[in-house]
């Protein structure tokens, strides 16, 4: 992987993680701001504030996984599906708007990250490298 590809990969992960973690925290801290975006059918199951607490926690978990590279392909797929559900819900209940356009851009970033097969700066890669070093050390001792 070239230097530019590494930078591009890290910036893609960082941008997606910032959005998910930032909005997740915001949903937990100030749910009243986000309540208008909660689909009406949710109110038959739970309050908007409760839903936003769970949704915010899920966004933080997805963003953290993307940032750290933990199950990156799975995390980016969850990010893409989350954004797709938001796009469809907001478009259906509130109509097409600049918010939907922004969410489409975030969706595309998540899809791009899903198809990026780089393992650069992922937690699993560092864990594997550590395990390999340990195994090599054991083999030289024997």
Image (tube, grey):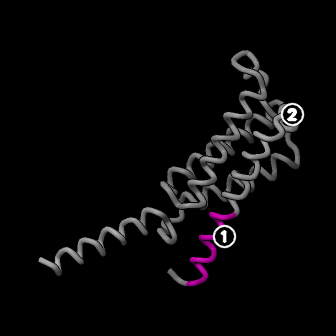
Horizontal side of 38 relative to 69 (left or right) equals right
How far is disc 2 from disc 1 in space, using C-alphas? Answer: 31 Å
Residue 108 at x, y percent in the picture: 67, 56
Q: Which residues are magenta?
A: 3-14
Indicate left or right for 9 with 19 as reference: left
Please, which residue is most extreme toward the front here?
141
**Foreground pick, 45 / 40:** 45
Q: Is residue 78 above or below residue 90?
A: below
Please tell me the numbered disc located at residue 11: 1
Q: Position of residue 22 (x, y in %)?
A: 75, 52
Residue 29 painted magenta: no
Mark 2: give few (<14), some (14-19) or many (20+) Cα within 10 Å. few
Pointer 1 local density, CA inside 10 Å: few below 14, some 14–19, many at least 20: few
From the image, tell me which residue sits under label 2.
Answer: 32
Q: Residue at x 78, y 26 (%)?
A: 48
124 in relation to 23, above or below? below
* Magenta-span inclusion, residue 11: yes
């Amino acid at each position: 992987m070239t230097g530019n590809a590494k930078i591009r990969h890290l910036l893609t992960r960082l941008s997606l993680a910032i959005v998910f973690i930032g909005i997740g925290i915001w949903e937990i801290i100030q749910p009243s701001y986000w309540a208008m975006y909660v689909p009406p059918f949710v109110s038959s199951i739970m309050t908007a504030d409760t839903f936003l607490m769970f949704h915010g926690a899920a966004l933080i978990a997805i963003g953290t996984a993307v940032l750290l590279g933990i199950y990156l392909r799975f995390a980016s797929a969850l990010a893409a599906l989350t954004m797709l559900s938001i796009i469809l819900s907001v478009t259906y209940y509130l109509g097409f708007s600049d918010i939907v356009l922004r969410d489409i851009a975030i969706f595309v970033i998540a899809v791009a990250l899903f198809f990026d097969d780089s393992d650069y700066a992922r937690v699993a890669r560092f864990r594997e490298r550590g395990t390999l070093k340990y195994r090599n050390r054991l083999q030289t001792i024997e």
